Structures are given as C-alpha cells and as structure tokens.
Amino acid sequence: MASKFTFEKIVTHLQATGYVYAGSAIYGGLSNTWDYGPLGAELKRNIRGCWWKRFVQESPTNVGLDAAILMNPKVWEATGHVSTFNDPMIDCKSCKARHRADELIKAQYPDVDTDAMTFEDMDAFIKTHKLVCPECGKSDFTPIRKFNMMFKTHIGVTEDGSSLVYLRPETAQGVFVNFKNVQRSARKKLPFGICNSGKSFRNEITPGNFTFRTREFEQMEMEFFCKPGTDLEWFKYWKEYCLKFVESLGPKAENLRFRDHEPAELA
C-alpha cells in the first residue's frame, strides 16, 4: 500500500521535529551533510545498541571490535581501493554539471546493466545513444574519468607522500587486519564473527537523496568466518537472522525483501 505521506513531507517533518538538521546551516550549509538532533541522536544510539546487543552480546559465535578510522595506507593498497575504488565521472561541457556516468545511463535507460559495463563501454554507450544532460538538455560530455572516492588527509607536521592517509571508506578492513589478534585474544575457533561499527567516508560525485547517500555515514558490519563447505549454510542462517532483526525494529514484513547481487556487482 502506498504511503499517505510524500517523501518531501517526511523530510520536512524530521527536520522540524529535531530528528535531523542540515549541516552547518547558519554558515550557508555544506551539501549533503546532516546533523542529528536530540531525537535523531537517540534514535541512532538505540538502533546501534539494539544491533550490538543482537549481533554481539546475544550471539554465541560473535565478538565485537572498535577499529580506528585512520589506517596504514598500505591496507588500502592491498585491498585495491587505491587503484580501483573509483566512480565514472563525466562533465557536461555546456553547463558544467557533473554526473556519474552509470547513473546518467540508468536514468535514461533503466534496463541497462551498468554494473557489467567498463568505463569504455559507458563512454561508447553515451555517445552512441546521444544521452542528454538532465540539467541543460545538451548532449556534449567530456570523456569519462576515474574518480577515487576515498578522502585523503595527512598526519604529522608535513604534507607529503609519506604522511598521506585515508579516511576509511568501509569498516570491514578493520576486521580483516585484526583477525589474528581477535582470534588469539578471544580464543575463538571457526566458525565465528567479528562485528565493527562506526563512521565511514566516501567522496561521492553525486551524493543526495536526504540521509540515504551521504559522504559521511554510519556502518554496522559483521564479517563471519567459517569452514569451507559450510558457507552457504551460514549465509542462509545470517540472512534470516538479519531479516528478523530488521523486523524487530518495527518495519512490517511485507515491506521487506531480499535482493541478490548480480554477478557484476560482487567484489
């Protein structure tokens, strides 16, 4: 059944009642940054608390971790994030609007599987089908460029290559680099899981859609380690476990569904 409230009305209500405010609004704001007000802060704290209780404290297999946001940059080189964690950026030459090429294609050709396309494929598709800029209606774009989504910063007193670090784009790597530490100190044997929650950061080209796509966001993540041959059994177990957890927060079962990733979406 369709909601009787529009998305815009819900957003207005959340801002008026203190769930969320536009970030640094008194100084002109900063696009797609949000501050959680008194009610929003309590809501987030309660959800995090419920998740931690269900996935760590009540689980016979899992333990918790609070990993650092800043990590040795070699971690992100090893995972491929430095070389491959890129979005396809494209600019309109007429109005200078910036777009993600895959989203530009999906907006005008929804049935096209952009996840299976290379940057070169997308470039050719945009030219062949004469896609237009949603801002000005022209069809005059720059070639696609790779845009790395990791935020960079520097540690120490000098800003050079030796002091470069990244704000983590995901919480998972904190789990992986601490696997041996956790296994040894917690005396765990397979199967077991490690849960980590906290802030992650992604320098999105085109963030938006209220709080659902921002450059700074919270993650609650579990990595589960099991013996070969038992992975599908555990995958089914945790899918059902996660669904029951979400239902326990209030959403109705008829409004929830599983969506399998397409092969091209898998890491």
Image (tube, grey):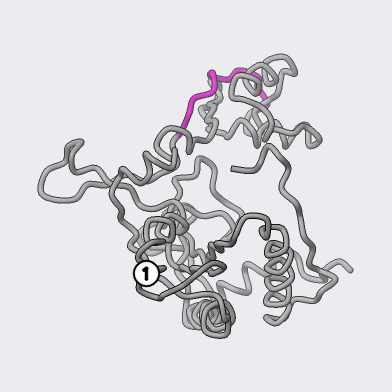
Q: Residue at 66% across / 33% down in the picture?
A: 104
Q: Position of residue 101 (x, y in %)?
A: 61, 30
Q: Which residues are magenta?
A: 137-147
Q: Residue at 45% across / 59% down in the picture?
A: 171
Q: Position of residue 127 (x, y in %)?
A: 67, 15
Q: Position of residue 121 (x, y in %)?
A: 65, 20
Residue of label 1: 184
**Where 119 sits versus 182, above or below?**
above
Residue ranking furthest to the left:
157
Whether the magenta-drawn stretch holds residue 55 is answered as no
Number of marks present in the image shown: 1
**Where 176 sits versus 150, above or below?**
below
Residue 10 versus residue 256: which sits nearer the camera? 256
- Determine the image quadrant of residue 228: bottom right
Residue 50 versus residue 5: which sits nearer the camera? 50
- Determine the image quadrant of residue 111: top right
In the rendered view of the protein, which quadrant contains the C terminus? top right
Residue 185 versus residue 241: which sits nearer the camera? 185
Whether the magenta-drawn stretch holds residue 138 is answered as yes
Residue ranking furthest to the right:
1
Q: Position of residue 167 (x, y in %)?
A: 35, 52
Q: Residue at 55% across / 80% down in the picture?
A: 43
Residue type at mark 1: give it.
Arg
**Where 69 sits versus 4, above or below?**
above
The overriding secondary structure of the stretch rendered in magenta is loop
Q: Residue at 59% across / 24% down in the picture?
A: 119
Could you tell whether 31 is left or right of 72 in the image? right
In the rendered view of the protein, which quadrant contains the N terminus? bottom right
Indicate the secondary structure of the residue bearing disc 1: helix
Q: Residues within 10 Å of mark 1 (few under 14, many from 20)?
A: few
Could you tell whether 49 is left or right of 164 in the image? right
- Determine the image quadrant of residue 108: top right
